[in-house]
Image (spheres, grey):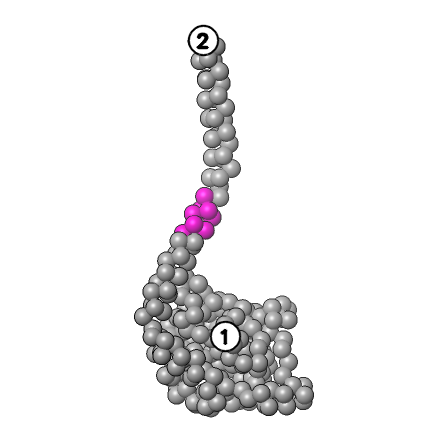
Amino acid sequence: MLKFLSKLASFLLLLSVIAGSLFFLIYPKYPEIKSTMDSLNANRLANNVALQLFTHISPADQTAIINDLQSSQALEHISIDEIVRLRNEGKILFNMEKQHTSLYIPSANIKGDVVDQEDVHGMERGFWHFPLSNEPGKRGNTVIIAHRFQYLPPRTDTFFNLDKVKVGDKIIVEQKNATFRYTVVSTKVVEKTDRSILVNYNDYRITLVTCTPLWTSRQRLVVTGKLDKIYGSI
């Protein structure tokens, strides 16, 4: 009996040593671990909410949204002929992904990668750089278009919160070897066929576009920023 109790005591002592060691290993990283777990739970909740919302959007409404974006009248539309012509002229350069381009709006918790593609399907992969517009930091108009409800917060790679952006807020575009900071100068709603927002102005600006009102594609929400370097903010 004494021999058994001695072994049991040794075993319990070993367990306490292991538990203590694990505590000292895990405790310094507890905030990081908790944050990760909270994020996972929040993402799961957001996905469940998105699923519930989308099940209440009728097939007809979903089809209408897709048709709106692909319509030849929509401001996002680019004809195949136009793409071929401009590529042959060397006027379309797919550099966003080569430059590891990302977009960040601190005030609205918007952050994600900017992607290249010839058509609106680029929005299925991230923030789509409209290929007929200029690159960030260059004279002209850099146009970035994204879905508003493909993903929901706490995910940040979505324009769900674009309506929270106000005049004076910062838009930051980061690339492999450069960072461009823009200050928001206007926010407005335009018709879905209004291509005037795509004009290649003579200043240095960025134009962000998404659908509005939320859960529809009836109109477009447009946020415009101008490069700080030119306007003396940095």
Q: Residue at x 44, y 63 (%)?
A: 155
Please give left or right for residue 176 compared with residue 152 in the image. right
- Answer yes or no: is residue 203 visible: no
Decide which of tag 2 and tag 1 comes sooner along the chain.
2
Q: Position of residue 92 (x, y in %)?
A: 63, 83
| Distance from Cα at disc 2 to Cα at disc 1 | 72 Å
Range of the magenta residues? Answer: 30-38
What is the three-letter code of the residue carrying label 2? Leu
Of residues 210 and 142, which is closer to you in this image?
A: 210
- Which residue appears farthest toward the top when viewing the image? 2
| Residue 114 vertical placement versus 25 (above, below) | below
Q: Position of residue 127 (x, y in %)?
A: 51, 73
Of residues 46 and 187, which is closer to you in this image?
A: 46
Q: Residue at x 42, y 84 (%)?
A: 68
Q: Which residue is mark 1?
A: 123
Was residue 35 drawn as part of the magenta stretch in this picture? yes
Q: Residue at x 47, y 84 (%)?
A: 70
Q: Which residue is mark 2?
A: 2
Callout count:
2
Please give left or right for residue 145 compared with residue 48 in the image. right
Of residues 34 and 218, which is closer to you in this image?
A: 218
